[in-house]
Image (cartoon, rainbow, N blue to C red):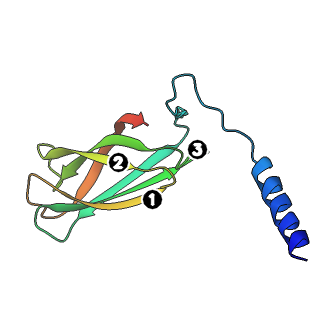
Amino acid sequence: MKRVLSLCMVSMLFIVISSFAPVRSSSSGIARLQVKMFTGDETFTVSAGPGIGAREIVLEVWRTGPEAGTGNVEFDVDIMYNGLPSQVGTHHVTMYSGQTHLITYQQTPVVIGTDAWPVGDVYNVVYY
């Protein structure tokens, strides 16, 4: 009985070991990561408003469209503070793959009294 059990265990071990395919290695031996460059077929919607602190704004961003949330993206957006054209600041935003909505609190160079809102579209959009 022990012989039959031993034979079964050895045969199962042989089947398990032989069922795996060998791993292909690259010629240099370094693993390579293929990065897809995205076309950016998405739209960014940005809103802003006063934050909790005196020099803080709440920045909210939505990514919509056919490729929304595909890949990491960084961009800049200009925000006007207190309705004064002389008080415009640039804010850098980073969103990660799969992220279609972001709420972030960012510091400003001026005291926010009444309001803050985006001026123009996002720019310097870089996918990585």
Please, which residue is most extreme toward the bottom here?
Answer: 1
**Residue 87 location, x and y as percent?**
12, 47
What residue lies at 44% left-to-right and 44% top-to-bottom?
72
Disc 1 on helix, strand or loop?
Answer: strand
What residue lies at 81% left-to-right and 54% top-to-bottom?
14
Question: Left or right: 9 with respect to 28?
Answer: right
Q: Which residue is mark 3?
A: 67
Q: Which residue is mark 2?
A: 94
Question: Left or right: 24 with respect to 98?
Answer: right
Quick one: 46 or 32, which is closer to the camera? 32
Q: CA distance from mark 1 to mark 2?
A: 11 Å
Q: Quadrant of residue 41?
A: top right
Q: Earlier in the sequence, mark 1 or mark 2?
A: 2
What residue lies at 38% left-to-right and 35% top-to-bottom?
125
* Residue type beneath disc 2: Thr
Q: Quadrant of residue 4?
A: bottom right
Q: Earlier in the sequence, mark 3 or mark 1?
A: 3
Q: CA distance from mark 3 to mark 1?
A: 14 Å
Q: Earlier in the sequence, mark 2 or mark 3?
A: 3
What residue lies at 78% left-to-right and 59% top-to-bottom?
13
